Image: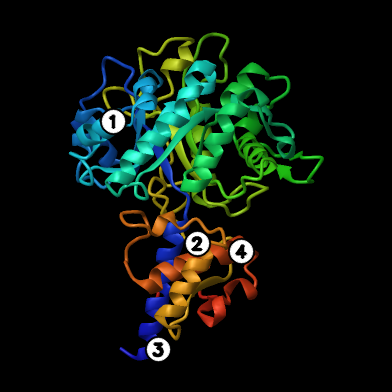
């Protein structure tokens, strides 16, 4: 094999790795508020059968953690609102919980995030006051054992955390939550943790059908909604709600915090007044959502921005209170049969659940580490991109998605390409003192 072919092959392989790392992902929420669900072992088999790689659970149940050991499935685990008080009061409580509930199962069970509390602003100010102290204690416990860069700490929010979401450019946080949000956002920015949001266009349509069209909520709209301040065009409510959050963060000068959607979905059944809760609408929403996410479409304000999204929920949960719809968000019945046919591919041969898609934000060029650059030049480039360049380099930390292959060239290429795509894909954005190399070979094209 000639040197030229080997170089082309290595470059293309590296490009594939880069884009796989940067791609958006689709996960599923595994709620267990039901009395008729399969055992965790059977759920793990179901998840593997459908090639689901990302899963959110709402606690740290030992049987669930054991069931997902050595499966490769990456887990978000949770600490409930009812458990916030002891975690917020004493560091020793966080240390003991980590020692007894997490460390015996990690890393065989791939835990990547811990959510500390859930939608606390929907409960009371007494609960919100506990969230950040509890997060800090969990983070400190992780740091003591060297896992604070491998397992990220955050908390989830409802869209009610915003006082205004339309037009998206006017997105603003509710001032009533200022004392809670300021230290929270500082924590997220300092530790490169995502802002986790639960987004449900279904509720926006259900509660205001005269102002929100069903097609707009389902990603099916044939017309655009224009933001009068920016001129940006929105074809679906999901993007508009995400951008409202982006603009709210930017208004407070938190521009580097990533957004993760920890819940979204559509119910397949509801009460007599919930006419939009049907299997067809649920299928339409989730199929269009999956396609939208894995294509790395981004949003009008953040085109090409990778976004991790978790669909709620794996199963219908018969013990959830409220309207009929609350018990019918599942993709599967408790007997493991599908509630409706869902397009798990999203597009062609791409595996939708793994998010294994190949993209660049400009669609034509990428920036990788030059083979002629020295190790010193590459390290300087990484340090600058991940520091002053504001690139989120958490993905190339040990045990994270893009850590392997553990080489300076691979890590530099990730950092260089991230900066390049974030900064207009210009020649200057790929210079890195000569250590960067711009390429236009499409990594999705197979080599002979």
- Look at the numbered discs 4 and 1 and tell me whether their residues touch, using CB distance below 8 Å: no
Of callouts 2 and 1, the N-terminal one: 1
Q: Earlier in the sequence, mark 3 or mark 1?
A: 3
Q: Earlier in the sequence, mark 2 or mark 4?
A: 4
In the displayed structure, 15 sits above or below 5; it is: above
Query: Is 438 situated above or below 422?
Result: below
**In front here: 132 or 49?**
132
**Residue linked to disc 1:** 92
- Which of discs 2 and 1 lies nearer the camera? The answer is 1
Question: To which residue does mark 4 refer?
Answer: 362
In-image side of 295 versus 10 (left or right): right
Q: Which residue is mark 3?
A: 4
* Mark sitting earlier along the chain (4/1): 1
- Identified at 34% across, 18% down, the residue is 33
Q: Contact, CB < 8 Å: mark 2 with mark 1? A: no
Residue furthest bottom in the image: 2
Q: CA distance from mark 2 to mark 1?
A: 33 Å
Residue linked to disc 2: 386
| CA distance separating discs 3 and 4 | 26 Å
Alpha carbon separation for disc pair 2 and 3: 31 Å
Quadrant in the picture for residue 140:
top left
């Amino acid at each position: 094999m000639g040197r030229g072919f080997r170089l082309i092959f290595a470059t293309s392989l590296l490009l594939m790795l880069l884009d796989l790392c940067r791609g958006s992902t689709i996960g599923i929420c595994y709620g267990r508020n039901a009395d008729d669900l399969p055992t965790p072992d059977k759920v793990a088999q179901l998840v593997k059968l459908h090639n689901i790689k990302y899963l959110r659970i709402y606690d740290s149940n030992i049987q669930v953690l054991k069931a997902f050991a050595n499966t490769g499935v990456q887990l978000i685990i949770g600490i409930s609102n009812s458990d916030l008080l002891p975690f917020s009061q004493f560091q020793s409580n966080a240390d003991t919980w980590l020692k007894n509930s997490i460390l015996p199962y990690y890393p065989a069970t791939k835990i990547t995030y811990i959510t500390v509390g859930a939608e606390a602003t929907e409960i009371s100010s007494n609960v919100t006051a506990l969230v950040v102290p509890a997060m800090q204690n969990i983070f400190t416990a992780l740091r003591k054992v060297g896992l604070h860069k491998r397992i990220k700490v955050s908390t989830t929010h409802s869209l009610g955390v915003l006082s205004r979401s339309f037009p998206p450019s006017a997105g603003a946080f509710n001032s009533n939550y200022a004392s809670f949000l300021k230290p929270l956002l500082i924590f997220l920015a300092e530790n490169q943790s995502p802002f986790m949001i639960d987004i449900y266009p279904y509720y926006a349509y259900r509660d205001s059908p005269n102002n929100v069209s069903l097609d707009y909520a389902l990603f099916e709209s044939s017309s655009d909604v224009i933001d009068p301040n920016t001129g940006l065009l929105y074809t679906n409510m999901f993007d508009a709600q995400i951008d409202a959050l982006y603009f709210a963060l930017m208004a407070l000068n938190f521009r580097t915090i990533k957004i993760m959607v920890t819940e979204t979905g559509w119910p397949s059944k509801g009460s007599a007044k919930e006419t939009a809760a049907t299997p067809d609408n649920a299928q339409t929403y989730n199929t269009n959502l999956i396609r939208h996410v894995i294509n790395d479409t981004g949003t009008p304000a953040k085109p090409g921005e990778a976004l991790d999204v978790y669909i709620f929920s794996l199963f219908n949960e018969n013990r959830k209170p409220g309207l009929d719809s609350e018990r019918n968000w599942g993709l599967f019945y408790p007997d493991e049969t599908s509630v409706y046919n869902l397009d798990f591919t999203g597009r062609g041969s791409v595996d939708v659940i793994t998010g294994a898609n190949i993209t660049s934000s400009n669609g034509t060029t990428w920036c990788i580490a030059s083979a002629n650059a020295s190790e010193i030049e590459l390290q300087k480039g990484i340090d600058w991109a991940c520091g002053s360049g504001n690139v989120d380099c958490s993905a190339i930390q040990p045990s994270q998605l893009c850590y392997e292959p553990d080489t300076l060239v691979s890590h530099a290429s990730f950092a260089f390409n991230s900066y390049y795509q974030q900064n207009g894909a210009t020649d200057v954005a790929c210079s890195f003192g000569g250590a960067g190399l711009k390429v236009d070979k499409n990594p999705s094209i197979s080599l002979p």
